[in-house]
């Protein structure tokens, strides 16, 4: 083997090439979108989109993402600072409760708020009762189906991304820096603004970036709220206007937006360096609060929990109590089975793909295998609608090629073998959530000493035997966690599923979407509750993981990695 090949692929090129095949499959949807978007046949479509759809959709998308970024930053940072720097009654409860909105998908939160703010909903009913009003013309009430309403709802649901990443840094910050600021005459608030907040900036930026990506990915909430973003434009252009080329071109614009977000996040911390040895850390002691101060902090921590979880949860439980007869609905049973099947298949696929990439980087360290890890996490940054288009193009081409060959050779029509089944959804979700499984498995694999590999080989074990007898047993908790996270994320995924699902095939997410679009909100309560209850499990695990104190170095890279694995 030449030295050039070894330098590029490492000492085990066969393993590196296997991982390359996995990465190629993960990158293929993105490449397919760019290919069809740049094709010459769609130039007229692009000109039409630029003159009609894109300007307004881009404006709304930018305003929505900016509003959500500011809202999540303000809520998440304030909650994280109060929890990490204060001690008050109920603190432990709020540490868990502040993460609960992550279990509530955006489209479920949106339809719950639509009903809560409706004329017949509990809020306006209470206002009319208190004020003695008899009609909506007697008083002013904000319209939740608007851009400000969407910003409020999405900020309420997505602030935990910023809360989690910021809280980790606030807990790890040394008391020495804060004490120096106080010695120099800064108040507690001044020390926060001048010391704690700048040190937490990389974590805040990483959390805000993740929240904005989730905002860009959403399709259910924006349609229910009447906000026409780029994501909705992709959906509308493809399915309602029948233009796949136009949808791909809008998707390419969305990819550019994602690239700008990532580049902006990197530039925001380009010149910052944080490297604090654990032995030099003197943890800041939380300030014990009593009386009205403790009550004020508890109310401040309770506010985002109420808006992000309790209000939507109340609406779901109220609706579900009126539709208990739907528990025997065949449509609900079918959607549940489809969701469990797809989520299980996606979890298994994502874990196998992540193991292949992470194991190749361990056994054959080289520039190429190191690059694989960077590429593996790209899918998480790509909106589901974009992946839906990118998956459909190559799979439909393969189906058409296979059907033609089978007809010519055997006279058998195979039809839409992949795109007409759940395989396309599994593929898209595996690409999108590969980052989740890869981050968790890579972290677990990195904690296993390389000496154990050498000892196993010395005792005559082959590479497969070493993996089966040493690595997999030691990584079983990491693998289980990765599988659970991917499983629940797939249950909640709507953007790609609504585009790729076969005819007469519903998951819990698409069942919720269809019933809410036609205004049957009560019928969507039971499938929504099933999704939320499933989402609570990894959220609880996430809180336990965030409480661990095994971090020894605080850097922007470790913070960003932890945020991505969330």
Image (cartoon, helix red, strand yellow):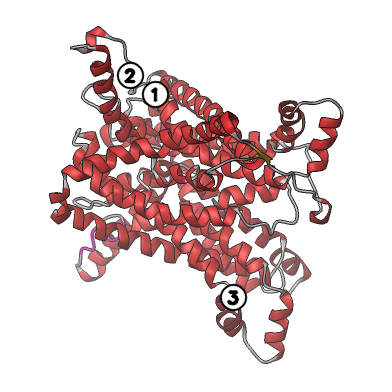
Disc 1 packing (10 Å; few <14; some 14–19; many ≥20) = many
Q: Does the residue at mark 2 contact the one at mark 1 (Cβ under 8 Å)?
A: yes
Disc 3 packing (10 Å; few <14; some 14–19; many ≥20) = some
Name the residue located 36 percent from the left edge and 59 percent from the top edge. 343
Seen from the viewer's position, the closer of residues 39 and 509 is: 509
Name the residue located 74 percent from the left edge and 79 percent from the top edge. 451
Q: Is label 2 in a helix, a strand or a loop?
A: loop
Q: Earlier in the sequence, mark 2 or mark 3?
A: 2
Note whether 409 is above or below 424 in the view shown.
below
Disc 2 packing (10 Å; few <14; some 14–19; many ≥20) = few
In the picture, the disc for residue 554 is: none
Give the Cα separation between the discs numbered 2 and 1.
7 Å
In the picture, the disc for residue 149 is: 1
564 with respect to 400 (left or right): right
Give the Cα separation between the discs numbered 2 and 3.
53 Å
Q: Does the residue at mark 2 contact the one at mark 3 (Cβ under 8 Å)?
A: no
Q: Is label 3 in a helix, a strand or a loop?
A: helix
Q: Is label 1 in a helix, a strand or a loop?
A: helix
* Residue sitting farthest toward the front: 291
* Residue sitting farthest toward the top: 138
Magenta residues span 413-418
Name the residue located 44 percent from the left edge and 20 percent from the top edge. 55
Image coordinates for residue 30, horizontal then vertical, percent: 49, 47
Residue at the disc numbered 2: 143
Seen from the viewer's position, the closer of residues 50 and 353 is: 353
Quadrant where the N terminus sits is bottom right
439 with respect to 537 (left or right): right
Residue at the disc numbered 3: 474
């Amino acid at each position: 083997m030449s030295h050039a090949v070894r330098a590029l692929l490492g000492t085990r090129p066969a393993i590196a090439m296997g991982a390359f095949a996995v990465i190629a499959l993960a990158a293929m949807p993105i490449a397919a979108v760019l290919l069809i978007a740049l094709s010459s046949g769609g130039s007229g479509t692009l000109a039409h989109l630029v003159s009609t759809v894109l300007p307004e959709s881009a404006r709304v998308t930018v305003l929505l993402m900016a509003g959500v970024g500011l809202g999540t930053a303000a809520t998440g940072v304030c909650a994280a600072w109060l929890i990490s720097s204060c001690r008050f009654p109920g603190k432990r409860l709020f540490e868990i409760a502040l993460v609960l909105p992550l279990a509530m998908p955006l489209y479920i939160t949106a339809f719950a708020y639509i009903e809560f703010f409706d004329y017949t909903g509990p809020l306006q009913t209470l206002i009319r009762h208190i004020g003695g009003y008899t009609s909506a013309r007697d008083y002013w009430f904000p319209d939740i189906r608007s851009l400000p309403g969407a910003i409020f709802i999405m900020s309420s649901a997505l602030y935990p991304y910023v809360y989690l990443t910021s809280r980790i840094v606030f807990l790890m910050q040394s008391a020495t820096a804060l004490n120096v600021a106080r010695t120099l005459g800064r108040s507690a608030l001044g020390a926060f603004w001048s010391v704690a907040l700048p040190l937490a900036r990389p974590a805040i930026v990483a959390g805000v970036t993740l929240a904005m990506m989730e905002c860009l990915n959403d399709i259910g909430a924006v349609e229910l709220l009447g906000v026409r973003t780029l994501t909705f434009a992709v959906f509308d252009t493809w399915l309602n206007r029948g233009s796949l080329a136009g949808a791909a071109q809008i998707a390419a614009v969305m990819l550019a937006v994602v690239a700008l977000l990532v580049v902006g996040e990197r530039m925001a911390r380009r010149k910052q360096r944080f490297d604090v040895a654990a032995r030099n850390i003197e943890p800041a002691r939380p300030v014990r609060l009593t009386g009205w101060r403790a009550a004020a902090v508890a109310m401040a921590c309770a506010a985002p929990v109420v808006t992000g979880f309790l209000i939507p949860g109340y609406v779901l439980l109220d609706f579900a109590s009126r539709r208990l007869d739907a528990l025997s609905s065949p449509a609900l049973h079918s959607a549940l089975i489809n969701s469990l099947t797809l989520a299980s298949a996606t979890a298994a696929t994502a874990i196998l793909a992540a193991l292949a990439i992470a194991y190749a980087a361990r056994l054959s360290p080289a520039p190429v295998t190191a690059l694989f890890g960077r590429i593996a996490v790209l899918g998480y940054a790509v909106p589901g609608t974009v992946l839906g288009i990118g998956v459909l193009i190559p799979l439909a081409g393969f189906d058409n090629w296979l059907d033609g060959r089978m007809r010519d050779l055997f006279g058998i029509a195979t039809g839409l073998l992949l795109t007409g089944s759940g395989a396309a959804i599994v593929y898209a979700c595996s690409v999108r959530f590969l980052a989740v499984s890869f981050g968790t498995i890579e972290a677990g694999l990195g904690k296993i000493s390389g000496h154990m590999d050498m000892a196993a080989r010395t005792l005559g074990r082959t590479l497969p035997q070493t993996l089966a007898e040493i690595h997999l047993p030691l990584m079983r908790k990491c693998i289980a966690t990765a599988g659970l996270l991917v499983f629940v994320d797939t249950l909640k995924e709507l953007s790609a599923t609504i585009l790729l699902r076969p005819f007469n095939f519903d998951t819990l997410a698409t069942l919720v979407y269809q019933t809410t679009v036609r205004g049957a909100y009560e019928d969507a309560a039971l499938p929504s509750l099933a999704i939320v209850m499933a989402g609570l499990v990894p959220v609880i695990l996430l809180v336990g993981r965030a409480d661990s104190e095994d971090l020894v170095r605080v850097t922007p890279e470790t913070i960003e990695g932890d945020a991505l694995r969330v």
